[in-house]
Amino acid sequence: MQDFQDLRLSPAAGVINYGQGLFEGMKARRAEDGRILLFRPELNARRAQEGCRRLGMEVVSEEMFLDAVYRAVEENKRWVPPHGRGELYIRPLIFGSGAILGVAPAPEYTFLVYTIPVGPYFKGGLKPISLKVSNEFHRAAPGGSGGVKAIGNYAPGMMPSKNAKAEGYAEIIYLDSSEHKYIEEVGAANFFCVKDGVIYTPELTGTILPGITRLSIIELARSLGYEVNETKVDIDFALNCDEAFAVGTAAMISPIGLIEHGEILATYNDGEIGEITLELYDALSGILNGSIEDSFGWNREV
């Protein structure tokens, strides 16, 4: 355990030269009764293991991963914001720190966890966002590394995202790179839409991240009696749905009020939050914050 500080790396470190690295994103929250809760951290550990294997890195055991996360949160308990005022963001990193000049796996790896307190994602309350479909750029291709949290997956999306935000949109929607018609992800979040009470989300084909919030929403919605289809989601179908929302660690659930696709502007619920979207948000946030009984056993107390 060390104070937050700079790292010392060789200029020939594998992560700098060849991008051999990945990260995870997690949050610790203070419940109404004062407990500090982690949300399904074992799934982050297992996803990191799969990522390590895909990138040719040494695998960090689930035991080591969780021990480091728990120790980091325990040491930083005083930085966990009060209930409802924010969370302690947790960033595990695994990367090739050993020097390697040839294109090959690094000879040594570093695993670390650091934390930082963050405020509420929706500071003015839950509000629908506007998105723009990218017809020029793609996030990933079949057979690539789109299904893991590789650090190299994120830099190519920064410019399209920045351009979309400059036009007044919150983020980009990426379509598949093969047929250019099926929704894959919303920036760095998973996509859901609702039609006639049925929930749809893009299936896991190796090109999108298997989000932990995504999985939790699927399981939660089914427990509430909703039909959830993991399938190819055609952009034309999504534009004609009743509701749409994005999910991820940062915002949990972000309602979508508008999507622009070329000349088409699709709006949902006149820009208001959909009924099913709100029900899922309230249910998941209640479990995360400890105000609703966690019948799934998802929370882990620090």
Image (cartoon, rainbow, N blue to C red):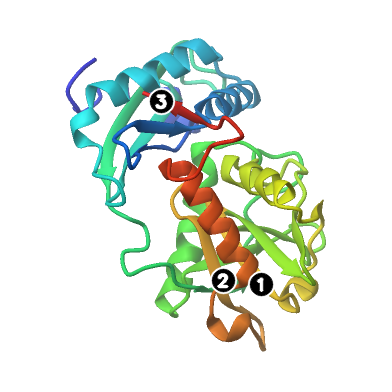
- Residue kind at label 1, given as amino acid type: Glu
N-terminal of the two: label 2 or label 3? Answer: 2
Is any atom of residue 187 visible in this view? no
Q: Nearer the viewer, residue 81 or 100?
A: 81
**Quarter-of-image position of residue 266:** bottom right
Q: Nearer the viewer, mark 2 or mark 3?
A: 3
Question: Circle 1 — which element?
Answer: strand
**Quarter-of-image position of residue 27:** top left
Q: Nearer the viewer, mark 1 or mark 3?
A: 3
Q: CA distance from mark 2 to mark 1?
A: 7 Å
> Who's the residue at 43% across and 50% down the image?
250
How many marks on residues?
3
Q: Is residue 173 above or below residue 83?
A: below
Question: Circle 2 — which element?
Answer: strand
- Residue kind at label 2, given as amino acid type: Ile
Quadrant into which the N terminus falls: top left
Quadrant into which the C terminus falls: top left
Q: x%, y% of residue 88?
A: 31, 39
> Who's the residue at 43% across and 79% down the image?
168
Residue neighbourhood size for the residue with mark 2, other residues' Cα within 10 Å, grouped as few (<14), some (14–19), many (≥20): many
Which residue does the numbered mark 1 point to in the structure image? Answer: 243
> Who's the residue at 54% across and 82% down the image?
271
Q: Is residue 302 above or below residue 126?
A: above
Q: CA distance from mark 2 to mark 3?
A: 32 Å
Is any atom of residue 178 visible in this view? yes
Q: x%, y% of residue 205?
A: 78, 43
Question: Circle 3 — which element?
Answer: strand
Which residue does the numbered mark 3 point to in the structure image? Answer: 301
- Residue kind at label 3, given as amino acid type: Glu
Which residue does the numbered mark 2 point to in the structure image? Answer: 256
